[in-house]
Amino acid sequence: IALRNWLIRENHLLTLRDSEELLYYKEGKYVYEGKKRVEKIIEKEYTGEYKTYEINEHINAIKRLTFIDREEFDKNPDELNFKNCIVNIWKPNDRIEHDHTRLFLTQIPHDYDPNATAQEYLDLLDQIIVDKKSIDGLLEFQGYSLYKARPFDLSLNLVGQGDNGKSAITEIWEYVIGEDKTSYESNMILGNNRFATANLKDKWVNFEIETSKNIKIDSSPYKKLNSVHRIR
C-alpha cells in the first residue's frame, strides 16, 4: 500500500474512467504512458523484488484508486496550455504556472510569448490570398480552432486550383497546434464509414486536402462534426 501511495503521489497518477488508461503528469500535461512509467520505476528502484504479476497487481490497484472522468481534463475552454505556461485567452498578459492540479491532456507544442509576431506568415498570406477580408476570415478561423468549446457550427473551405499555397497554410496550421491534435479524414470516409469518426478523438482540426465533386456521401456525420454534438 505504501508503494502504491508513493507512486501516485510522486507521479500524480490518474486513470481515465472510460478507457482505464493510466496517466501521469509530465511537463505541464497528463500523458498516456502511466503504466510504462510505473513499471519502469518499480523495476529500477526494486530490481528483482517484484514479479510481473505483482507489478500488474500494483498497477490495477493504482487504477482503482485514481479514476477520473475524461471531462475533467481541458475543462476550461478559455485556457490554452503552452509548453512554458497556461494562458487565459481573455487575459493574454497573465501567465499561469503549470501545476498538476490543472488537468490538461493537450498542449500547444510551443512556448507562449505575448510579444511574438507572425510577420512571415502574414507576408505569405498576402502572396497567396488577394482579398484582405479572406485573410482576416482565415486568421479568425485559425484562432477559433484553438478554442476547445464549439459555440458556432463552422467549417472552412480553401478554394483554388493547382499549386497555389493551400498546402502551405495547412502545414503551418498543423505545426502551430501540433500534429497530435490534427487529422486527415476525408468527407467521403467520414460519410461512408461509421467507424471513421473514432480517428477524430482529441483532434482540434481535421483537414481534407482535396474534395471530390462527384462522390455522394452521407452528410449527417459531417454536420455533426461541425456542431457541438458529442461524436463518441
Image (cartoon, rainbow, N blue to C red):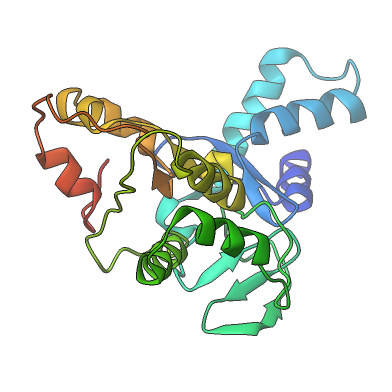
Q: Residue at x 26, y 33 (%)?
A: 211
Task: Provide residue 42's location: percent of width, then percent of height.
Answer: 82, 28
Q: Is 43 in front, or is 175?
A: 175
Left or right of residue 211: residue 124: right
- Judge whether residue 69 can be spotted in this image: no
In which quadrant will I find the C terminus? top left
Residue 179 lies, with reference to residue 137, above or below; the image says: above
Q: Quadrant of residue 187?
A: top left
Task: Provide residue 9's location: percent of width, then percent of height.
Answer: 74, 53
Q: Residue at x 67, y 15 (%)?
A: 53
Q: Residue at x 15, y 48 (%)?
A: 223
Q: Is 2 in front, or is 152?
A: 152
Q: Is 226 in front, or is 123?
A: 123
In which quadrant will I find the N terminus? top right
Q: Quadrant of residue 51?
A: top right
Left or right of residue 21: residue 201: left
Task: Provide residue 207's location: percent of width, then percent of height.
Answer: 39, 40
